[in-house]
Image (cartoon, rainbow, N blue to C red):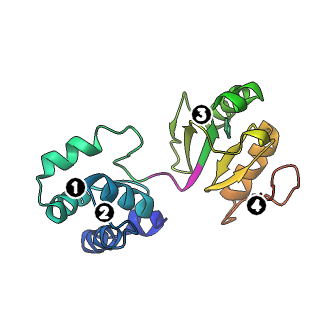
Amino acid sequence: MQETVAMSANSDTLRQLVQQAIAEQPSATVTVLSSLLSVQDALGYIPKVALEEVATRSGTSVNDVWGVASFYPNFRFVPPARHSVEVCWGPTCHILGAQQLFQGLMGHLGLEGEGDTADGEFTLKLNTCLGSCPHGPVVSLEHQLAGHMTIDQLKAHLEELQVGAAQPKLNDASHRWDPSP
Ligand code: FES
């Protein structure tokens, strides 16, 4: 994700990043939705200029593109915080402690639900299932999965990110697993 670039980009650079994201979609079938997804994957959000670019590329109106974008709650329209934290909210992780984890995180980050911290450091989200149910409770930190997570371990990883680590150190065997079958 190029959100750091996107957050500081001037409007010409931002438009170029959007155009590149739309042009480089791997799917043979390009739709309004696939283009919006591609922009969000690349930038972490849908800037206003993306609505214009997707409309132009799709031969439709900005209003129609907005109609699609605003329908899906997973699209966001402001840049994300510097770091991403997602807590799995699926049934298995629920049984294994996701609720306590999320509540602990909200308290730690000063949030009352999903959202961005006031200092712009963390975006906290819930995810319906991160696809690694036996390792619950599972979180995604900077888009890396980690399992069997406790609130204390999670706080320590957030601190690593805050002091400048590009990725949390998830090499503890209790967090990481070999995803190959
Ligand atoms: S329920 Fe949490 S990873 Fe599936």
Q: Are marks 1 and 2 in contact (CB under 8 Å)?
A: no
Name the disc covering residue 51, or none.
Answer: 1
Say left or right for 101 vs 114.
right
Magenta stretch? Answer: 80-84
Q: Residue furthest right?
A: 173
Name the disc covering residue 20, or none.
Answer: none
Above/below status of 72 relative to 2: above
Q: Are marks 4 and 1 in contact (CB under 8 Å)?
A: no
Q: At which x and y percent is residue 124?
A: 56, 41
Label 3 sits on a secondary structure element that is loop
N-term mark: 4 or 3? 3
- At label 3, the amino acid type is Gly
Name the disc covering residue 180, or none.
Answer: 4
Label 4 sits on a secondary structure element that is loop
Foreground disc of the pair 4, 1: 4
Distance (Cα) linking label 1 and label 2 = 19 Å
Distance (Cα) linking label 4 and label 1 = 38 Å
Q: Residues within 10 Å of mark 1 (few under 14, many from 20)?
A: many
Q: Which residue is mark 3?
A: 110
